[in-house]
């Protein structure tokens, strides 16, 4: 490898490292990292389902990842080996 190619590779590596350091302090980067962790292993969460009047119907607690469809009328997650599907309800999911 010639010297010019080595300098280019070093510059690209240094620039990439600098960008990662800048991103590491960003809120959006922190959210992205948490999203990846959630997708891979889930997070400890509490999901509460409410009826149309705002009354709590059911609460789910455990380590799970939540999937919402693009229309917002279906929430899906797996908890203790069982699939939970919730249609047309208000669901508030909080991290414990």
Image: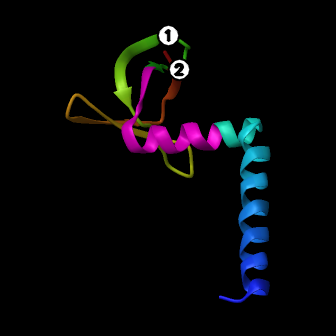
Q: Quadrant of residue 42?
A: top left
Secondary structure category for the residue under label 1: loop
Picture coordinates of residue 10 (x, y %)?
74, 69
User: In front here: 31 or 53?
Assistant: 31
Residue identifier under label 2: 94
Q: Mark 1 and mark 2 in contact? Answer it, CB < 8 Å.
A: no
Q: Quadrant of the N terminus?
A: bottom right
Q: Position of residue 94 (x, y in %)?
A: 53, 20
Q: Residue furthest bottom?
A: 2
Q: Residue furthest top?
A: 55
* Spatial CA span between label 1 and label 2: 17 Å
In the picture, measured across the screen, residue 55 lies left or right of residue 11, that is left
Asked whether 48 or 62 is in front, the reply is 62
In this view, the residue farthest toward the front is 3
Q: Point out residue 93 in the picture as x, y percentages from the top left corner.
A: 51, 24
Give residue 57's quadrant in the image: top left
SS category of the residue bearing label 2: strand
Residue 67, given in percent of the width and then of the height, sits at: 45, 43
Whether residue 6 appears in magenta in the rendering, the answer is no
Closer to us: mark 1 or mark 2? 2
Q: Of the residues under marks 1 and 2, which one precedes in the sequence?
A: 1
The mark total stands at 2
Look at the image and give the residue range highlighted in magenta: 31-46
Residue shown at 55%/41% (left/top)? Answer: 35
Name the image quarter holding residue 29: top right
Q: Residue at x 75, y 45 (%)?
A: 21
Q: Which mark is residue 85?
A: none
Residue 85 in view, yes or no: yes
Q: Vertical placement of 96 versus 79: above or below?
A: above
**Residue corresponding to mark 1:** 55
Q: Is residue 41 above or below residue 70?
A: above
**Which residue is at a point 34% across and 21% down the rendered structure image?**
62
């Amino acid at each position: 490898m010639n010297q010019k190619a080595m300098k280019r590779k070093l510059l690209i590596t240094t620039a990439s490292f600098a960008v990662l350091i800048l991103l590491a302090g960003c809120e959006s980067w922190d959210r992205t990292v948490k999203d990846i962790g959630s997708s891979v292993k889930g997070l400890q969460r509490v999901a509460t389902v409410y009826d149309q009047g705002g009354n709590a119907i059911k609460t789910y607690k455990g380590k799970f990842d939540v999937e919402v469809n693009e229309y917002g009328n279906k929430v899906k997650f797996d908890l203790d080996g069982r699939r939970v599907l919730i249609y047309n309800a208000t669901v508030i999911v909080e991290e414990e």
